[in-house]
Amino acid sequence: MAAKVQDAIFIYEYKDKTSGKKLKGEITAKSEALAKAALRKKGVTTSKVKKKPKALFGGGGKAIQASDIALFARQMTTMMESGVPLIQSFEIVGEGHENPRMQKLILDIKAHVEAGGTFADALRQHPDQFDALFCNLVEAGEQAGILESLLNKVALYKEKSEGIKKKIKGALSYPIAILSVAMIVSAILLIFVVPVFADMFESFGGNLPALTQVVVNLSDFMQANWFYVLAGIVSFVFTFKQLNKRSIKFNQTMQRISLKLPVFGQLIYLGAVARFARTLSTMFAAGTPLVEAMDSVAGATGNIVFFEATMEMKQKISTGESLAQSLRNAQWLGKPLWPNMVVQMVQIGEESGAIDKMLAKVADYYEEEVDAIVEKVSSMMEPMIMAFLGVVIGGLVLAMYMPIFKMGEVI
């Protein structure tokens, strides 16, 4: 059996789009080719990618997650609001982290700042963990002398974004998990339990009920071909994951299809709207110009339909069109892409000069909508799943007992 390929850390060089400086970053991947593919997917143009020696990256540890970055932002905010100096804040947060990789990342940032660099430049050394939004807000905070205030906005933004992602993933994974359990239980019954009953029925002689005969035939098929069925399922799941990870076109197609799914499509749609509003509100609060903000906003939506619409809106806004008008004109499949409420709230915000507050209210509203739909889906799914399990598992059990009932009637 082939050994599992472990993740490695790769160092790469790239040019910062804002400052034009040559910077270095790190990315975790299983191979150099996959590291380059992941960087291309993020839109990072690299001049050099090489594997980082094991001795330099702190003895392993689990990969850094988005939730780790959100926690880092919240901890730094708390430290700075408490009056702890920046360097000392890095030490306290970094040394107290359980994940060695995250610990090393924070201490690397501290070393960069100690050497005379800015906090924002230190973050830009690690674009795989800190996106443009995070770096730009920190830079704005440093320049305006309100770093703790903008770090708080970053922390809130990250927490809200991750919260929505987890809720949507949870709602999607719940039925998949139950379906998987049902398939496993059914396979066990067909391969190990049904054959016992089938041998008993054969000794009785006579014709079996139609449902029982179908189950016995299915059991015979599973016993003879279980390896091929299992291999087919594993191959399908593996191929799907690899295509979704490596093929941008396939990934984008799946994102478009996801918006058309019943119930779950609405959940994904509202999540994208909430992330759009939350990201743009945060960028406005930091004083980022609208046209510049649209790049970060487009990437934050998490869906290619909204990404393309946002980039198209950016082009129109750069020619003088208002944000509200560009939202109103955005179409998908012949219908308005954005809810009317979003358009109206943005228009009011533009007229009153409080667009960041209006967008924050929009984000709050749609985040609550996501919560409500997740709760509704969960309450709907439970009886549906119970009914499904009852039909599948109960059907198999009933099929096995029908001949026994028939014999009892004859006796």
Image: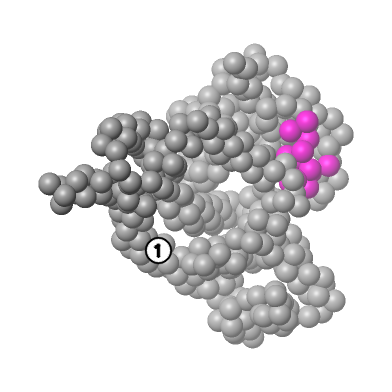
Q: Secondary structure at mark 1?
A: helix
Q: Nearer the viewer, residue 390 or 74?
A: 390
Q: Amino acid at mark 1?
A: Val
Mark 1 crowdedness (10 Å alpha carbons): few <14, some 14-19, many ≥20? some
Q: Nearer the viewer, residue 190 or 199?
A: 199
User: Quadrant location of residue 192?
Assistant: top left
Scheme by which the image is coloured: one colour
For this view, does 254 lie left or right of residue 400? right
Image height check: is 58 above or below 397?
A: above
The magenta span reads 33-45
Res 159 seen here:
no
Image height check: is 117 above or below 348?
A: above
Image height check: is 131 above or below 374?
A: above
Task: Please state the horizontal and vertical placement of residue 394, each as a whole percent of the image.
Answer: 29, 50
Q: Is residue 261 magenta?
A: no
Residue at x 66%, y 62% (from the top left corner): 256
Residue at x 80%, y 29% (from the top left corner): 49
Q: Nearer the viewer, residue 319 or 115?
A: 319
Magenta stretch: dominant secondary structure = helix
Q: Which residue is mark 1?
A: 377
Q: Most extreme residue toward the left, as rendered?
A: 411
Res 273 seen here:
yes
